[in-house]
Image (cartoon, grey):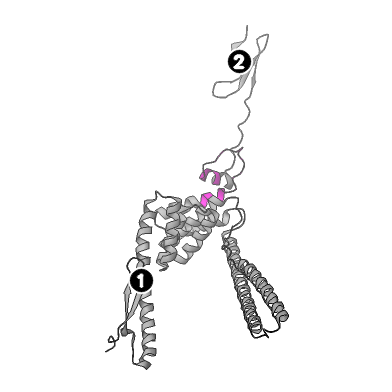
Amino acid sequence: GFDLDAAASTGADASSGADVVYELGGGATEVPAPAPAPAAAVTTNDAEAAAVGTTDPDAPPDPLAKSKAAKAEGNASFKAGDYLDAYDSYTDAIEGCPGEPTGSQLLKMREEFEEAEREKAAQRHQEEMDRRRKKDMKEADKKHRAARTKFRDEDDAAAGEASADGSKSGDEESDSDDGDDDDEGEKEPPARFDPPKHPHASDLAVYHANRAACSLHLNRPSECVEDCTVAVMLNPTYVKAYMRRSAAHEALEQTEDALKDAKVALEIDPRNAAARTNVARLQKIEDERLEKLKVETLGKLKDLGNSILGNFGLSLDNFNAVKDENTGSYSISFNQGGGT
């Protein structure tokens, strides 16, 4: 027998959440439920985690959380056509991405590398010129010795034989030296800049390429080229970056560079229809540009030639240039009456 009236007198009900302990002898004791814990405040990190789809409190913090949130804002602005806001958001994503080297550091390292390569090329050129001068001096000395030997007294057999032996020995030495010089003059393949690895290279490449897309829409092709260059240094197989840089080069009327980037994109992704179309289109533009340049150059050379030949009563009209359509070269013939 438990005293149900005693239990009722405690005031416990289902809604209170309190526990009732029934005692031997008919008594009952109510154990109040613990007070609920206060709701935790939402922190900035929680908001950033929610923005990138990570809300697990036990998960380690994402080092790219701020960058990803900024990128998401940039994507929304870009889709809405707000390219300035998108540009700023992608800049925040770039600046919030941890790790080195940064994009500006990569560009500086590449510039320093190219400057060092130019200095090496200049040094190699100077060494090649010195090598050729040395070779010319040896050839001149060889001819001088041969001439001296030729005019020696042929009646002195011993002296002539010794001179011939000396000339032969000198010739052999000169030939050997020339061979060594030729080996030293072999050209080295051009060095390529190999950038250091970035811990978040793929993500950072996307941020730079996205900002490059904004620059295209904002008519800033030079900035687009710079951002895309950083992107392909971080990710050398990034097709979109090559395509955007190609478009920027074309906007700058740098069709040769635009064609190169389009070809690289097509090489990486042979099934890319846009890259294939751009390669064909840009190749045609580049061929026309080169042909126009060739015509302009020939025109300037013709004017120069006429100014010289005029002193002899001639002009370049006395010469006929016929282009070979197969090779693109020209054959020239003289026409005596062409200038009359």
Secondary structure at badge 1 equals helix
| Pick the front one: 103 or 73 | 103
Asked whether, in this view, residue 183 is left or right of residue 247, the answer is right
Amino acid at dot 2: Ala
Vertical arrangement, residue 90 with respect to residue 48, above or below: below
Asked whether, in this view, residue 326 is left or right of residue 224, the answer is left
Determine if the magenta segment contains residue 152.
no
- Which residue is found at the position 54% from the left and 57% from the top? 233
The residue pinned by badge 1 equals: 291
Few, some or many residues within 10 Å of mark 2 (<14, 14–19, 20+):
some
The dot on residue 228 is: none
Residue 93 position, x and y percent, is 53, 54
Q: What is the magenta range?
A: 48-70
Give the spatial CA distance, label 1 vs label 2. 105 Å
Amino acid at dot 1: Glu
Vertical arrangement, residue 21 with respect to residue 46, above or below: above
Residue 68 position, x and y percent, is 52, 49
Secondary structure at badge 2 equals helix
Residue 43 appears in the picture as rendered: no
- Which residue is found at the position 55% from the left and 40% from the top? 55
Few, some or many residues within 10 Å of mark 1 (<14, 14–19, 20+):
few
The dot on residue 7 is: 2
Determine if the magenta segment contains residue 67.
yes
Quadrant in which the C terminus appears: bottom left
